[in-house]
Image (spheres, coloured by chain):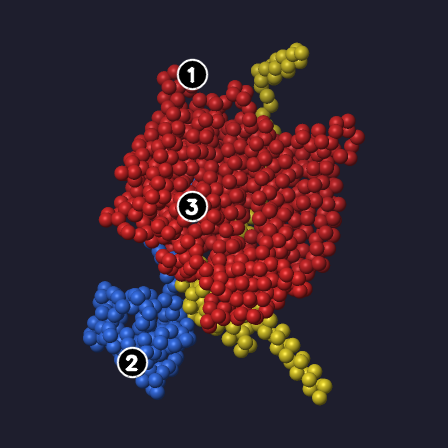
Amino acid sequence: MKRFILPLGVFAALLGFLWAGLHLNPREVPSPLIDKPAPAFSLTQLHVPERQIGTRDMAGQVWILNVWASWCVACRQEHPVLMELARMKLAPIVGLNYKDGRDDGIANLQRAGDPYLVSAFDQDGRVGIDYGVYGVPETFVIDKRGVIRYKQIGILTPEVVTGTLVPLIAKLNKEGGNG
Amino acid sequence: MVKWLAALLMALALSAQADEDLDKRAAALEEELRCLVCQNQTIADSHAGLAADLRREVREQLAQGKSEQEVLDFMVQRYGDFVLYRPPVKSTTWLLWFGPLLLLLAGAVLLVSRLRSARRETPAPSEEELQRARALLDNDKEQP
Amino acid sequence: MIPELGSFALMLAFCVALLQGVVPLFASLRGSAANAGAARWMAVARPAAYAQALLVTFAFTCLVQAFVANDFTVLYVAAHSNTLLPLHYRISAVWGGHEGSLLLWIQILVLWTAAVAALSKQLPAEVVARVLGVMGLISVGFLAFILWTSNPFERLLPGSVEGQDLNPLLQDIGMIAHPPLLYMGYVGFSVAFAFAIAALIGGQLDAAWARWSRPWTLVAWTFMTLGIFLGSFWAYYELGWGGWWFWDAVENASFMPWLVGTALIHSLSVTEKRGSFKNWTVLLAIMAFALSLLGTFLVRSGVLTSVHAFATDPKRGLFVLVFLALVVGSSLLLYAWRAPQVGLGGRFAMFSRESLLLVNNVLLLAAAGTVLLGTLYPLFLDALGMGKISVGPPYFETVFVPLMAPMLLLLAAGPFLRWKQAGFKDVRSLRWVGVAAVLLAIAAGVAVGISPLLLMGLTLAAWILIGSVWHLLQRLRVFEDNRTRLDHRLSMLPGSYWGMLIAHAGIGVFVIGVTLAKGREISHDVPMRSGDIHHVSGYDFRFVGLQNVEGPNYSAVRGTFDVTRDGKHIVTLLPEKRQFASGGMPMTEAAIDRGPTRDLYLALGEEIKPGNWIVRIQHKPFVAWIWAGALLIASGGLLAALDKRYRLKKGKA
């Protein structure tokens, strides 16, 4: 009798997993960079091509890196939230203008508003690859020691800002920074 | 002069061969990497922008002399194991890689036990069954 | 009006299905056919089946009408059609999306049910009642799914002026034929399932039951083979990258029931001839249909990522999951309860045809289990919070080949073994077949380039093909003195024998195709401009030029390529890049020159600079043998199903 109940047992286990699967998102790729040092970069500034902006400039403080592009439709949805985030002055926001045209990027910020301290111009997307960017927009929170502590895949919503970013940045600000 | 020409031709031929080798190695690697913005495609077959960028990375790194494993490690560092179509063998994928073997072994065990039980005697027919069998056989024989 | 009639017909069909599912089953439990009252209730089954078929067919016709008439007040039509869409694609668009394809599913189910009702006159009334009852219950589930979550007749008011168009990838003849053929297979396994449940309920599992069940299963399996073949064939020329199998979740969802179905048809033949394997056969029948339902779940729930997946909705996924749980759970429960009483059946020795077929069952199940493991493993890990991985072709190819190799080895030997007790002398002559196979493979390998995998594949294929021919010669007793004429002896061979022979030979042909196509394929992606020439495998591809062409609902860029070999013109290939009026990503239309020994495959990639395109040029040896092999396998199934012994007159069963 026992071996005849085995198929049913296996099937029941399978059902459990399938049911769990209904609540998961198979397309979401979690970042392996959490709690790892943010990849160093130094790129030209979007508005001022003669000057550079990079990870070294942001060392010693908690900061936010937001990946955006003028061709990205979802970014437009996110933009008001970013503007609000900038107004809250939680942490400086550095933009990463990903695979865009310089003029298009500048025009986009002129039209919609510029929440960024400065935007870095990543024309060929190499810095994006270093950060494991696979979709736009994406947002990273980096602590005083230059370690990535959080990645938001997809648009920032007010709920994420108040529920996750505010407490996280408060916590990170309490942490000490060192070399 | 001739020697110089010969050396030049040789270099050209070798670099053409090297190019072809690079192409082959790059193509092989591209079949191992997943396009992250697609619905299940390799970066070799995808037309997406990110796929083209990653193909460029693969080619450049191989040309710089990196090994296949180094290129794959580069990708995994940034995107996680998800980007590999051949899952790495680690404790969490142990069941995946050895599962087929385990299934075969389980099947073999099942097989042996089934073959053994098949050799056990089936019960001998009862007297009533034997009589019915005889009657049927005699019946058949009588038909023209 | 008409869509509402269609919807109403489905509701009526639901009621009829409920009747068909509940009443005859209940009656068959209460009393046998001898009891007149029970017999009357059981007799409800057939007319209910016919009524259901009529109603669903009517509903299906209503949906077809909505598409043909461009009725964009129906949401589903607006989402999947377009006024510019040619008529034949407007009809195939009926099953281009989730709701319509479900309607196709139920349409095919009611046709199978009606067929079983019509062709079951020789079966005892209880069996008919139970089989049709089970199929009725399955109908209930699918009709409920359609009516409650996925009604294709839902209105879009006010109607839109223009539809969103059928996905350009699906505007193709392959799209017209592939889903119906595949569904004929998926749904057809429900007949085997119903027979198995009927047998478990009745407690009567014997050779007669296997003889009733086998032809239905063979036909379903044949359709499944054709459906999978067509999907692969279509992907090859439609997707523009030259591949024909990607071990994608949805492809695997069709391959698993096929593997189990193959085990089932072999197991049924043992039960039919020897009365053994009864528990195996019943379990396999349940598993084959369970995998069909699992496939339905995987494709429509969003649980796995796939190019084939329909628009996903977890709510629909939950419905299918619950249905799956009920159907398979209750059948496995029934199995656990009744199987111990079924008995062992005939004895057989350790070395016999039965034992080899048992090994066959185990290997096929291990293969199906492996595919299931690989397909669902990312889900397992994610659900347990242990990270996200991908399992793709490199994994499947690594594990599948070692699994299949022993099967192919035993395939040729199996038919030589006698039932019940085989002797070594049955297979002694095969050693010469083995030698011949190895020599032939080496010769072929020398011609195309030797590699271990190539040699193994070719040896196994030759082993199967030569072994099949050898078996035929032995069966015809060509080497003995015999009074009967050869052609008479040929005609005396039963359909099931030809079926086995041709299907097995088909596998050999298929293995040759796969081994050479994968092992010796050459693929180049090169930037080319007008006037450039590229060389691949002795062929010269000259890019002549580009032109713009207009189709009925698209505009395209067409490249002209002249292909020559040693100066002689072979063919002119015209690949296209199509942009459809309804928008979306441009579509690649590959140009293929097919031949018995090689395919030349050309596709336009991207335009990197005006007039400068990346072109994919492939030389693929023996690809046609893959298709030929698949068709032979399907033919074998058909021949076996048409065997005379299944076409008994009424009363003789």
Mark number displayed over residue C168: none
Which of the 4 image quadrants contains residue C583? bottom left
Mark number displayed over residue C34: 1
Q: Pick whichever of labels 1 and 3 is earlier in the sequence.
A: 1
- In the rendered view, would you say C419 is above or below C602? above
Q: Amino acid at mark 2?
A: Val
**Badge count:** 3
Q: Colour of chain C?
A: red
* Image x and y of residue C128, in percent: 44, 26
**Tags 2 and 3 in contact by the CB under 8 Å rule?**
no
**Tags 2 and 1 in contact by the CB under 8 Å rule?**
no
Q: Nearer the viewer, mark 1 or mark 3?
A: 3
Q: Colour of chain B?
A: yellow
Foreground residue among C567 and C494: C567
Chain of the residue that carries numbered disc 2 in the rendered image? A
Mark number displayed over residue A118: 2
**Chain identifier, blue in the render:** A
Foreground residue among C266 and C498: C498
Residue extending furthest right?
Answer: C481
Horizontal side of A68 relative to C484 (left or right) equals left
| Residue at position x 46%, y 71% in the image | C610
